[in-house]
Image (tube, rainbow, N blue to C red):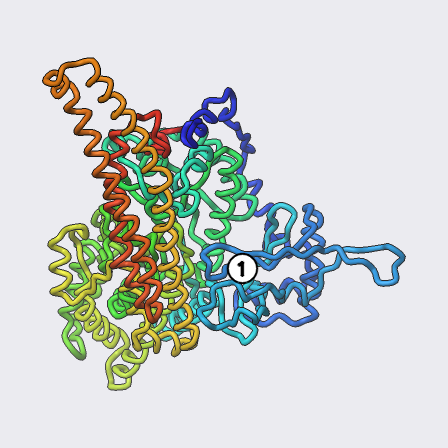
């Protein structure tokens, strides 16, 4: 009877089964852009002037939408959606599961006493709020399992869109008692906090015309594509999203020939259709290419306002899975689906933009604009220095632990790369004396230090791929975010810590101004102190090196290598105070989210361990024993034919193989038993933190011996007998 592996390979060989699904692209992709989005242009067409103005105020100023306006918007949204073929609507939200969620309701409504007639109805109350069941979503103890009620509430700052026949309304998700249960609500609060703080700094010291500061985000999404038949043949991929076993192929990524190479035809057709769907939904994807590992790819969009960018990334991951299915692919977002080849990340490029059209992290044409740049640049570095452990916790997960520091991703030590030339500018600023500056000092500072920043950045130092937080000319790139993560978590932290830091900065500058210093002198004095304090996180070298770990320890930087270590820091009073002061989380919400992340970590390791044990016992051991029996029959045959002395010579290697197989089978059996026992011990821990630590330190390490013996058997057992689809097939089947 053929194994799943050979059935999958047989499926691949069927004539025309994997023929290229050619995709026609219109002459101009721009003609498709926002076709299925209730965009500003569409709203202008469908809404009354008052309703349109009200929506714009809500989007740009955070104004509250009146009930009668909501009714008008709902009717217009419904008419537009029905004209596009929609029959249902849903509040589209992002619970703490890591994926999106939706409950579809029909526009269809029977008319009471209407004699069998019906109509399509959608009111303001339906638009503003929906009531999904909240009991089964992760809540960290905020909800009891018998308390089902939760609410989704419309977020007018992110446009509605149509998926298939459903109008999707981006929404926040809260409990019946008002606590947040999603990623979006805290993000919106953090965006509001940094907007207020940054706007105040701009208006006070640089530009009184600035009325709003918007954080921007450009994400880069990496992923693997695996043929769907091969995917279904691997229980570990199906259940955990990663391979738990598998010997490295002779060729992996050593030649770097896949990187930026010609995109395979079948993959290109997937990408073309994906881009078409993205255009229709207003996701401005512009870049596609092969990544380093075989069958690994990347796409990236233009920068957008952070809230919309987060929504678009979550939506994109859903679209990618659907389009991949049509092309007989399965998409892998796991950070490390294959051992021995690069994993996948999601670089988050972050900056701050004003409503006057300026990027606050980009230098200008005069010393004043460059001082503005330095202010936001240095404050960002100071924020990362002060809250490095919180930033680390925001990217922590069981899957990302496999990738961080694994020679393709930044290490778990949070450091910042800014380039040697810009570092030199900061060293010059550090020399600014305390107090008032002489006219000569002011001139030298503005012309020879601050004034030269644009020239420096035109030819900036090469990028550092080993840095988790790198300045890349006019933005900071947070490189350590995992490919499966929701961008909202790290964006909430990033904007919160910068908001808090800018508040502190303004207070300190204002105190110096009150003491008689000129505005620029006060700013220089405060920035100088920040540079001194923050220099410990600035590192230009190889973040992968052992020397950096030693140096980082000397500098007092934490190396939180595992998720339990990182999440334990999340509850430090300093971080709790930050969230509470800015109104982003209540104390109860902070503890609940920490609990959810710890529970998820333990659950993921439990699932992986259980699947590994199942495969080892039910696939690997029987296969090995089957092959061993063949060898035994071969040895018996040799003994019947040859004399004892000749037999011993001829059967020596077979006998060694029989012994070696027995040894590996024994190791697997013993280690699987130990693994299952360790799971039960870990589950008996007194609290979530202790349980996560036990899974990390006592359960996870047991995977390696099982894998080592299994992979050794893979290289010994007859290829025709081996049940698991091999790496060479998963990674090189186009």
Tell me if 492 is positioned left or right of 392 in this view. Answer: right
The residue sitting at 51% across, 72% down in the picture is 143
| Residue toward you, 535 or 707 | 707
Query: Dot 1: few (<14), some (14–19), or many (≥20) neighbours within 10 Å?
Result: many
Task: Identify the image quadrant of the N terminus.
Answer: top left
Q: On screen, 643 above or below 530?
A: above
| Residue toward you, 529 or 158 | 158
The picture places residue 198, in percent across and down from the top left corner, at: 38, 70
Q: Residue extending furthest bottom? A: 515
Task: Identify the image quadrant of the C terminus.
Answer: top left
| Residue toward you, 329 or 373 | 329
Q: On screen, 268 above or below 45?
A: above
The picture places residue 22, in percent across and down from the top left corner, at: 52, 27
Q: Residue extending furthest right? A: 115
The picture places residue 354, in percent across and down from the top left corner, at: 42, 63
Q: Is residue 455 visible?
A: no
- The residue pinned by badge 1 equals 93
Tell me if 671 is positioned left or right of 554 in this view. Answer: right
The picture places residue 455, in percent across and down from the top left corner, at: 24, 52
The answer to which quarter of the image holds residue 640 is top left
| Residue toward you, 443 or 594 | 594
């Amino acid at each position: 009877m053929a194994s799943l592996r050979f059935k999958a390979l047989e499926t691949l060989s069927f004539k025309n089964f994997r023929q290229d699904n050619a995709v026609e692209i219109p002459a101009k992709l721009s003609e498709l852009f926002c076709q299925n989005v209730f965009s500003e242009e569409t709203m202008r067409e469908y809404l009354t002037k008052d309703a349109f103005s009200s929506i714009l105020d809500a989007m740009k100023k955070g104004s509250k939408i009146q009930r009668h306006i909501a009714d008008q918007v709902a009717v217009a949204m419904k008419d537009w959606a029905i004209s596009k073929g929609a029959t249902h609507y849903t509040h589209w939200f992002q619970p703490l599961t890591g994926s999106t969620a939706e409950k579809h309701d029909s526009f269809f409504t029977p008319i009471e006493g209407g004699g069998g007639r019906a109509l399509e109805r959608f009111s303001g109350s339906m638009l503003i709020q929906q009531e999904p069941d909240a009991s089964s979503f992760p809540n960290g103890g905020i909800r009891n399992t018998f308390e089902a009620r939760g609410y989704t509430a419309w977020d007018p700052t992110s446009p509605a869109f149509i998926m298939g026949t459903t109008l999707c309304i981006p929404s926040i998700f809260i409990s019946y008692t008002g606590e947040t249960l999603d990623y979006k609500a805290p993000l919106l609060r953090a965006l509001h906090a940094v907007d207020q703080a940054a706007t105040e700094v701009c208006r006070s010291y640089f530009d009184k015309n600035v009325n709003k500061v918007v954080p921007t985000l450009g994400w880069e999404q990496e992923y693997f594509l695996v043929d769907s038949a091969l995917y279904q043949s691997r229980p570990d991929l199906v259940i955990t999203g990663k391979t738990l076993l598998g010997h490295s192929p002779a060729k992996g990524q050593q030649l770097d020939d896949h990187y930026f190479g010609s995109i395979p035809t079948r993959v290109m057709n997937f990408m073309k259709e994906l881009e078409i769907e993205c255009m229709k939904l207003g996701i401005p994807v512009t870049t596609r290419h092969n990544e380093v590992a075989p069958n690994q790819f990347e796409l990236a969009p233009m920068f957008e306002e952070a809230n919309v960018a987060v929504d678009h990334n979550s939506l994109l991951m859903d679209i990618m899975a659907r389009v991949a299915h049509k092309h007989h692919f399965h998409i892998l977002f796991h950070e490390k689906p294959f051992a021995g080849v690069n994993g996948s990340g999601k670089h988050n490029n972050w900056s701050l933009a004003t409503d006057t059209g300026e990027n606050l992290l980009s230098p200008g044409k005069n010393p004043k604009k460059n001082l503005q740049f330095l202010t936001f640049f240095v404050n960002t570095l100071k924020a990362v220095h002060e809250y490095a452990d919180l930033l680390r916790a925001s990217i922590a997960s069981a899957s990302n632990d496999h990738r961080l520091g694994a020679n393709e991703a930044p290490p778990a030590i949070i450091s910042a790369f800014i380039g040697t030339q810009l570092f030199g500018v900061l060293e010059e600023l550090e020399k600014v004396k305390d107090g008032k500056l002489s006219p000569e000092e002011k001139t030298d500072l503005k012309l020879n230090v601050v004034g030269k920043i644009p020239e420096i950045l035109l030819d900036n130092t090469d990028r550092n791929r080993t840095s988790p937080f790198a300045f890349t000319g006019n933005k900071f790139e947070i490189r350590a975010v995992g490919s499966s993560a929701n961008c909202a978590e790290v964006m909430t932290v990033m904007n919160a810590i910068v908001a808090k830091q800018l508040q502190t900065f303004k207070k300190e500058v204002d105190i110096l101004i009150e003491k008689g210093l000129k505005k620029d002198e006060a700013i220089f004095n405060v920035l100088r102190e920040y540079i001194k304090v923050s220099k410990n996180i600035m590192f230009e070298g190889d973040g992968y090196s052992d020397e950096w770990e030693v140096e980082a320890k000397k500098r007092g930087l934490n190396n939180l290598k595992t998720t339990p270590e990182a999440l334990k820091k999340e509850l430090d009073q300093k971080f709790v105070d930050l969230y509470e002061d800015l109104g982003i989380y209540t104390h109860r919400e902070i503890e609940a989210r920490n609990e959810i992340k710890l529970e998820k970590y333990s659950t993921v390791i439990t699932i992986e361990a259980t699947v590994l044990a199942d495969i080892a016992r039910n696939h690997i051991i029987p296969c090995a024993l089957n092959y061993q029996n063949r060898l035994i029959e071969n040895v018996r045959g040799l003994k019947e034919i040859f004399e004892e002395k000749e037999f011993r010579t001829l059967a020596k290697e077979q006998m060694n193989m029989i012994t070696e197989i027995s040894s590996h089978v024994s190791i697997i059996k013993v280690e699987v038993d130990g693994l299952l026992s360790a799971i039960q011990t870990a589950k008996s821990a007194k609290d979530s933190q202790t349980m996560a630590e036990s899974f990390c330190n006592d359960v996870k390490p047991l995977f390696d011996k099982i894998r080592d013996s299994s992979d050794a058997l893979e290289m010994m057992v007859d290829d025709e007998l081996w049940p698991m689809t091999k790496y060479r097939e998963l990674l090189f089947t186009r």
